[in-house]
Amino acid sequence: MKGVNYREPRGMPYVRREYIRGKPQLKIAKFASGQPKNDYDYKVELIVTEGLQIRHNSLEAARLAANKTMATAGDMSFFSRLTVYPHVVLRENKMIATAGADRLQEGMRRAFGKAMGLAARVHPHQSIYEAYVTQANLPLAKRGLKVASSKLGCPTAIKVTQLREIKAQEEV
């Protein structure tokens, strides 16, 4: 199963997991990490520039990459949150791929398929990951989100928002 096959959102999303036997499990371990407090200076967001579906494997890989990069400053020096939830069930109609198959199999047209994974549908200019940091850790957060964007396989942008006024440090 390749992620490129499920990138474009086609049709209505299938989200009714109660009707599926052998439903796929969510690969995302946790959606928020770090120290949630109110004295951060900046909010750094990873924004998707196209409307597409992002598989839960790549969301978890991006989250781990960003957290690992930002954790070099300390686990309690930032707060990060994944802001999308992969609820769309991806289905695959498997075709015969044995050694004796000398022609491509057509299969049933518009077959339902087996549930293979989950994905999150995102819209253009939607934030999928956000990190709250202090001024000292801002370059580290930008680098972490740049590493995370390489795991997603879609065009992204990084947006920095200043949350509070930063006082100039006085030299003694």
Image (spheres, grey):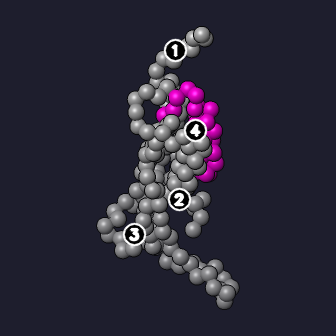
Q: Is residue 51 above or below residue 7?
A: above
Answer with mark 3 or mark 4, whichever residue precedes in sequence.
Answer: 3
Find out whether the residues at labels 1 and 2 contact each other: C-beta distance under 8 Å: no
Find the magenta span and give its range: 132-158
Residue named by callout 4: 73
Residue named by callout 1: 167
Q: Residues within 10 Å of mark 2 (few under 14, many from 20)?
A: some
Q: Nearer the viewer, mark 3 or mark 1?
A: 1
Q: Nearer the viewer, mark 2 or mark 3?
A: 2
Residue named by callout 3: 23
Q: Position of residue 117 (x, y in %)?
A: 47, 65
User: Residue farthest to the left?
Assistant: 18
Rounded to the nearest angstrom, the CA distance separating label 2 from label 3 is 15 Å
Q: Position of residue 161 (x, y in %)?
A: 51, 27
Q: Position of residue 65 (x, y in %)?
A: 59, 49
Rounded to the nearest angstrom, the CA distance separating label 3 from label 4 is 38 Å
User: Residue farthest to the front?
Assistant: 172
Q: Foreground residue, 101 or 141? A: 141
Residue at image x 58%, y 28%? 136
Residue at image x 46%, y 21%? 164
Residue at image x 51%, y 18%? 166
Rounded to the nearest angstrom, the CA distance separating label 1 from label 2 is 41 Å
Task: Residue 57: give its label.
Answer: 2
